[in-house]
Amino acid sequence: MADEPLILGIETSCDETGVGIVRGHTLLADALASSVAEHARFGGVVPEVASRAHLEAIVPTMDRALAEAGVTIADIDAFAVTSGPGLAGALLVGVAAAKGYALATEKPVYGVNHLAAHVAVDTLEHGPLPEPAIALLVSGGHSSLLLVDDLARGVTPLGATIDDAAGEAFDKVARLLGLPFPGGPYIDREAAAGDAGAIGFPRGLTAAKDLAAHRYDFSFSGLKTAVARWVEARQRAGEPVPVADVAASFQEAVCDVLTAKALAACQAHGVDTLVIGGGVAANSRLRALAEHRAAKLGIRVRVPRPKLCTDNGAMVAALGAHLAAAGVAPSRLDLPADSALPLTTVSV
Ligand code: KG4
Ligand code: ZN
């Protein structure tokens, strides 16, 4: 085990500055600085604010990770950094830092895909990923269903959201319920005290007519509008809004569709492992419903612990370690920060 390379991963695609250090599947450090509080009053991440925060946080976060792992920069065998997708200015900070450290230490650097890293992070918790697997990635920026044949070399996109991302829907619904940003954890908490069957909100792209063209795609904007209309009608009637019931019913609609489509993909592809990643994978109902439905089908669900589901540096290091172990060549030192990096590109 000690002969596996020591990999340091840097994540700056959105509002979290993350630096993680791993050896093989062992997590040694996971340092994080978040600018989320600075975005809260805008109700969403402000790119320029995020970039500046990354710039201020990157070196201290790097130093904290090295101290946590009890190693020095000279001990690192290879660097990994999120090359995309994400906010262009935010990505640039991490990519420039990784290049600087790689150049100074004469060590290789892997520019990696943020979404593939959300899948790879699960290996830190549950060991090697059986392939093929189906991955459901649900975050503030993405909602995708993937067939993972070979995480080191390529994944096959099966479907994605056609409008809002799942996390975005949680954040928007939280906002109209008067809950803080980012709304996912607050909806999760409110929902625990509510009745998930109180209001029958729509399940996007599940009607027979939609399934032909959108079997594995998602749509959450109609659901968000339905929640807004329902809340407005209450307010217009001068009645109190039952926040817990609305939160629970909304959450149920999202989790119902996500788990149904992910498990349908497993069955259609004869796959018995479902990995769930991204910030929304921290949702307690999504985890419970996926486990419950998968158990009946003989499918194993792997979801990393909540701290590894949201953006962090460990996930980038985990993917870097996976690439190194699979013998994938590192990136060139002029590797790009690509805000629109396609899902099919695992490393640049
Ligand atoms: O993966 P992530 O940290 O960043 C992106 O790449 O977007 O995901 C953040 C998203 C936010 O929309 C947040 O509201 C959502 O994940 N989230 C949750 C929960 N925790 C975080 N959504 C539902 N339930 C949660 N417990
Ligand atoms: Zn993410």
Image: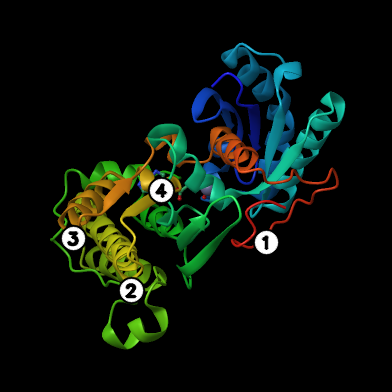
Does the beta carbon of the residue at mark 4 sit less than 8 Å from ligand 2?
A: no
Q: Are marks 1 and 3 in contact (CB under 8 Å)?
A: no
* Kind of residue at badge 3: Glu
Q: Mark 3: few, some, or many residues within 10 Å (few <14, many ≥20)? A: few
Residue 201: x %, y % from top left: 24, 69
- The residue beneath circle 1 is 340
Q: Give the structural element (helix, strand or loop) at label 4.
A: loop
Cα distance between the residues tagged 2 and 3: 28 Å
Which label lies toward us, 1 or 3? 1
Question: Horizontal placement of 322 versus 301: left or right?
Answer: right
Q: Give the structural element (helix, strand or loop) at label 1.
A: loop
- The residue beneath circle 3 is 239
* Kind of residue at badge 4: Pro
| Residue drawn at point x = 42 percent, y = 72 percent | 217
**Residue in the foreground of this view, choosing between 132 and 72:** 132
* Kind of residue at badge 2: Gly
- The residue beneath circle 2 is 204
Cα distance between the residues tagged 1 and 2: 25 Å
Residue 160 can be seen in this image: no
Q: Quadrant of the N terminus?
A: top right
Residue 138: x %, y % from top left: 43, 55
Cα distance between the residues tagged 4 and 3: 52 Å
